[in-house]
Structure formats: C-alpha cells, structure tokens
Image: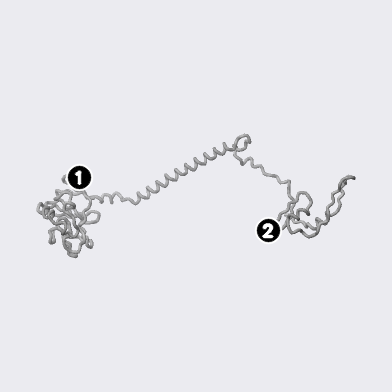
Amino acid sequence: MLKPNVSSYLKTASQVVSNNLKKGGSNAIIPKKPNTLPSNGFNLGKLLIDGNIAVTCGPAVSSQIRWAHTDINVPDWTNYRRDSTKNPNVESSSSEDSRKNFSYLLAGGTGIVAGYSAKTLVTQFISSMSASADVLALAKIEIKLADIPEGKSVTFKWRGKPLFIRHRTADEISIEQGVAVASLRDPQHDNERVQKPEWLVVLGVCTHLGCVPIANSGDFGGYYCPCHGSHYDASGRIRKGPAPANLEVPTYEFPDEGTLVVG
C-alpha cells in the first residue's frame, strides 16, 4: 500500500497548470493547502484532488492514501459453476429444488444406514452377553419320578446348587397340611409350596447362612442344618432355629405324569 507524502504532493500541486488550456475558459487553480494533515478523513478528502484516490481512516486505523487500481482482472468462475445455473433464462428456484431433493435423499439414506448399523451393533452386543449353549443346557434339569421311591428325598445338582426332590407319603402330606399357618415364622400353607401333594421340590440351601441341610432328619422329620441348628418340616418350612425363612421353591413343571422339569 502506497503512503505518499501528502504535504509535498499538495505543495507541488499548488500552482496553475496550463496544460494547453484554451483562452477564454476557466482555468483550474488548486489553492495552497497547509502542510499538516487534517485530524479527520472528511477534511482530508477536501485536500485531495479528484481522481482515483481512496482515503481510509478510523478509530483504530491511521489515515492512509492509496491509488485505486481499476485494471484488476476478475477471474472467470464459469467452469466451477453448476450447469443448471449457467443459463440466465432459467429460474434459480428450479435448480435449488433439485439440489434440495438430492440433499434430503442423501441425508435420509445416511440416517437409515446409521440406524440399521446401530441396531446390528446393539443386537450383537446383547447376544454376546447371553448364555452359551452349554449354560442353557444346565438351566433346566429333567428328573424321572419313577426313580424316587415313596418316603425318600433325593438330591440333584441344579445351577450349582443342591436340589431336594421328596416323594412324600400320605401321612406326611396329612401332617404338613394340618399345621397352623399362624404359628409359623414364615407363614405358608403346604398347598402354596407344592403343585402335587406327593412331590416336594425345594433348594437345599439353608436360609440362614447358605449351608446344606440334611434330609429326613431334625425335630420335624424334614430337613436339619447341623451348622446352626435350623429345623425344617417335610414341607421345607422353618420350624426351629435361626433360619429366617422357608427353603426356596424353584420354578418347575410336570410335562407328563412321570417327568419333572425344574427351571
């Protein structure tokens, strides 16, 4: 940017320039100007001659004088424009609508692909946390009831826990159904704990500290935990000792008359 000495410029121009003027016409005389620059751009503009001169000033910019370049070549951007916008006889709205439709289509397709990818990722992640085939095989146990004689209790292993299957006699059923529920620590009628009166299915885990009770023993003829002296009856209900609750009854079903499926 050029910063000429304005004072010297004005000093040089403060004289009559004949320039082969015709006689009888008005001659342009530039009066003398002070050598010091004015304090603002408005007064500075009055000091300059007319022509391709631009004045820039502002609160954060010092006053400057530069010649305006009128011979700058503007680049031709035609090769970079869309073909649909080169024809001046075609309305720009038609091209705009087509571009919007393409943008909407692209955004919608991207959203669908992203959603499907997220669904697949979440499904695979949840499937990875599901139990494997061998674990699912242990989730249920099938028991042949004909192998358990009447009056006996057989222990099986189910999900890492002991499982007691008891084939109760008619006398045991009668005794357990006649117990006053109000007198129990964990009130439960015998009918609430069995699906068939002759079959008792409970987990062999003491509700006190997780010990394994002994079947067909104790003061009530059911189960006895020797660790801390908890006594259960033939319905698996706590009758004496520190255990706070009855033995847990797992989920089970009888798919047919001679088969029991637990789990």
Mark toward the viewer: 1 or 2: 2
Please rate how many residues cluster around mark 1, counting C-alpha atoms within 10 Å: few if below 14, some from 14 to 19, many from 20. few
Which residue is most to the left? 171
Near mark 2 (Cα within 10 A), the count class, few <14, some 14-19 or many ≥20, is few
Seen as rendered, the residue at the extreme right is 23
Locate residue 132, reporting x and y percent: 31, 50
Kindly identify the amino acid type of the residue bearing the numbered disc 2: Pro
Residue 191: x percent and y percent? 16, 51
Q: Residue 170: x, y in percent?
A: 10, 51
Tell me what residue is drawn at x 36 percent, y 50 percent. Answer: 126
Q: What numbered label is drawn on residue 59?
A: 2
Tell me which colouring the rendered structure shows.
Answer: one colour
Q: Position of residue 260 (x, y in %)?
A: 19, 48
Residue visible at 19% across and 54% down in the picture: 202
Distance between mark 1 and mark 2 Cα atoms: 95 Å
Task: Look at the image and tell me whether residue 28 can be seen.
Answer: yes
Q: Could you tell me which quadrant the N terminus lies in?
A: bottom right
Q: Secondary structure at mark 1?
A: strand
* Residue 71 horizontal side relative to residue 252, left or right: right
Q: Is residue 7 left or right of residue 214?
A: right
Residue behind mark 1: 255
**Residue 214 can be seen, yes or no:** no
Please name whichever residue, 255 or 183, is drawn nearer the observer in this view of the structure: 183
Q: Amino acid at mark 1?
A: Pro
